[in-house]
Image (cartoon, rainbow, N blue to C red):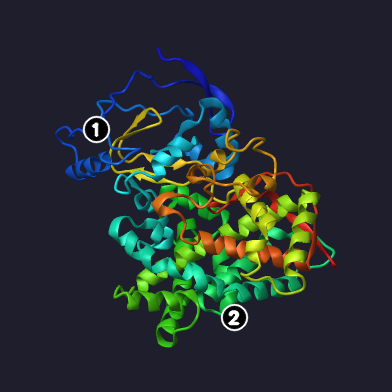
Amino acid sequence: MGDRRPAVDAGGSVCSAAAPSRTTPRVLGGRARGPPAGVDPVRSLEAARAASRPGLRAAYTPRVVLPPGPSSSALLQTLAWVRRPVRLMRACRAAYGPTFRLRFAGGRDFVFVTRPEHVKEVFTADPGLVLAGRANAAFARFMGPHSLFALDGEAHRRHRRLLVPPFHGERMRAYGPLLVALTRRHLARWPRGRPFSLTAALQALTLDAIFEAVFGVTDARTMARLTGLVARLTSRASALLAFVPFLRLDLGPWSPWGRFVRCRAELDAILFEAIARARRAGGEDILAKLIEESVRRGEPLGDDELRDELLTLLGAGHETTATGLAWTLSRLLAAPAALERARAEVQEVVGQADPSAEHLPRLTFLDAVVQEALRLDPPVPIAVRQLAAPARLAGYDLPADTRLAPCIWLAQRDPEAFPDPDAFRPERFLGARRGPAAAFTWFPFGGGARVCIGMAFALFEMKLILATLLQAARLRPAAAFSGRAERHAIVLTPAGGAPVTLEDA
């Protein structure tokens, strides 16, 4: 019999389960061997191509050896992932080690990897072997089949070429004054002297930034409609719809998926109006620039493609940034010395002027604060790829269609990479020369060819908003900081909404 070791049930408690047999699997070197009869020849070709690259490679083996994982049902593991993801990840890491398996609804095996060498293998593998679009297929039901999240191969490369320019360089920096003005506008509305949810306030701020900077929408009535629709689409119920496939049935307006579909249709109508306006009149917003760029390159995007990418930018760009800001400010407010140092740096560098792109390179401690907060509390806990062919990773022989999940949350708390990993210490990012290996120990925006296209813009936005708030606001926590996370759609936000009180400066 195989060795027995502690196992973790879906609630995070310890039970007993047999570990998988760990007989030595067949190792393939040099070239991938041909598949046996009956194996998909397309996957065979992908495997052969991947075999010529270093790191993770396709490997046809006579057996499957999966990492150990909880023995509870796929449905219970899915519910635990939706309701208590941090508890589940920590418990599995303690029980099974740095590589473990979770099985989610629909019989989907997710192999979590936390060691930097294994994260590197996934992120540097041939994109034809590790498919992000296929792994995110469930999100195509939410964001559309043309979403950057749902694409692989040449279709993904085409969309990425068109989407990258507006989020970098001079085009990105041009949105600085808008971000600062929006921050001051929202700050003026925040209540004084009584607690409010910092997370909710920052979500409203970053949502308005998306509406104005990306969609080019400035009409108050339209923005209010969009805000209500987004709130309904990103509710806790949406997380269940994303992870439990059998709930995605339209049984009318009273069913969860039926409500979602009708809400999406309302949002689509507004987005198609914005697309038509941008085609007619142009503008300085990202949507207008995206249309302009696609025409200039001779690769014009259709309305459905544009709609799907707008939904992607909305889903991936607003809540993740707001959550990163909420965690960063919560960590700062719980560390008075770091808070005062950050505030003093902003005062020294910016003074009474509006924070701008020109100030950011000199706000080195603020940059370290952001990096450390994103290390401790990445808004999205995992990146996901799906194997197009069998492959070996971390000593396990994995079948095709296995999901590989470099675990951002656990990898960024590795004590070998970050001593005293649970402590908030921005100084660890000051003056540090981060070599190539750092990309596999700090990766809150994912990695490899699929690293988030909005990474530079998100960091730019976070630092400008933080500098503006540190300059103009005096916030204090309304409750002791617990560090606990709760799920909101696909992101992990501070538990309880991070209640704060705004005092007069």
Is 295 in front, or is 152? Answer: 295
Left or right: 273 in relation to 236: left
Is 66 in front, or is 435? Answer: 435
Left or right: 492 in relation to 333: left
Identified by mark 1, the residue type is Gly
Q: Residues within 10 Å of mark 2 (few under 14, many from 20)?
A: few
Q: Residue furthest top?
A: 1
Which label's residue is closer to the chain start, 1 or 2?
Answer: 1
Quadrant assignment for the C terminus: bottom right
SS at mark 1?
A: loop
Residue 132 image point, x, y percent: 38, 50
Mark 2 = which residue?
A: 221
Instruction: Tell me: residue 468, above or below residue 181.
Output: above
Mark 1 = which residue?
A: 30
Is 263 in front, or is 482? Answer: 482
Residue 206 image point, x, y percent: 61, 66
Q: Which label belongs to residue 496?
A: none
Instruction: Tell me: residue 421, above or below residue 158.
Output: above
Q: State how far apart marks 1 and 2 are (Cα).
A: 62 Å
Where, by quadrant of the figure, is residue 105 drawn? top left
Residue 253 seen in render: no
Residue 446 image point, x, y percent: 48, 50
